Image (spheres, rainbow, N blue to C red):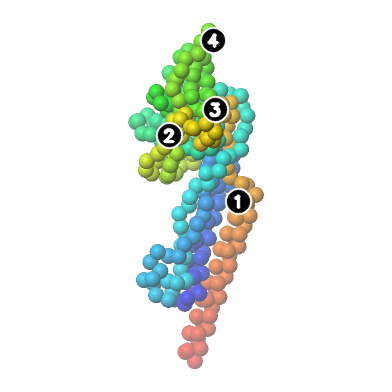
Amino acid sequence: MSRELFSAVSGAQAAWSQLDVVSHNLANVSTNGYRARKMTFQLAQDANNRGVLGQAYTEPGESPLDLANGSLEKTDDPLNIAIQGKGFFEVQTADGRRLLTRSGDFQLDPQGMVVTSQGHQLMSSAGPVQLLQGEQLIVRDNGVLAAQGADGSVSDRGFLQIMDGEVTPLGTTLYEAKGEMTDVVQAGLTLEPGEAPPVQLRQGHLERSNVDPLGAMVELIEASRYFEACQKLMKASDEADQRLIRTGRT
């Protein structure tokens, strides 16, 4: 295999991976709390074992999350909560598994539990967040929770579990912790005077996707053109090899 063909094949594979990542980002422009993924490239990890051809071989690297805040949409729904800053909501599945999300469009189930659209329970320092009949959830900017009864009385409910650290995507808006996580709400409750809080909660708002549609479209076009260029290079390399073969036969 010629050097240029080796480069073209690896380049086309990398461009295809980039097309897949960017297309997924664009498909989730309207998904609440969606974190865009970035595309990186690297020299093949075993390039030194590939000889001269290995020096021209590239492959996709990790696809880290873009952790920038998404824009806010005001809804005035007390069960809509937006994170501004670090961290993810901690939620619990029906089998007790702890997962993470930035999507704050919560709702009440028949038992009064505050849950995601998939039915995962929102977690607080006191356990799953639950409201009694007639109660309304109150979320302070610092993550402290309270519930206001129909008679106007207010009762403390701990504080939200907003966890920050390395995560692994499990789907569109769900993530799993990769290691030790930090409770950023609890950390914010013990700040020194003048320190900026690591996170702010906005009740009655939703955090939109942080995908930049225009930037993603430009990246999609660039990746498409790069893929086409690699295809042309593969075709030209194959034609050059065929001419060389014919010349050798004559």
Residue 147 appears at what percent x and percent y? 49, 17
Mark 4 or mark 1, earlier in chain: 4
Residue 214 appears at what percent x and percent y? 65, 49
Residue under pointer 2: 183
Which residue does the image show at 63% across and 47% down from the upper left? 213
Q: Are marks 3 and 1 in contact (CB under 8 Å)?
A: no
Q: CA distance from mark 2 to mark 4?
A: 30 Å
Q: Is residue 185 visible?
A: no
Residue under pointer 4: 152
Asked whether 7 or 248 is in front, the reply is 7
Q: In the structure shown, which secondary structural element does the residue marked by tag 4 occupy?
A: loop
Mark 2 or mark 1, earlier in chain: 2
Q: Are marks 4 and 1 in contact (CB under 8 Å)?
A: no
Q: CA distance from mark 3 to mark 1?
A: 32 Å
Residue under pointer 3: 141
Mark 4 or mark 3, earlier in chain: 3
From the viewer's perspective, is residue 134 above or below residue 182?
above
Q: CA distance from mark 2 to mark 3?
A: 15 Å
On the picture, is 219 further left or further right than 39?
right
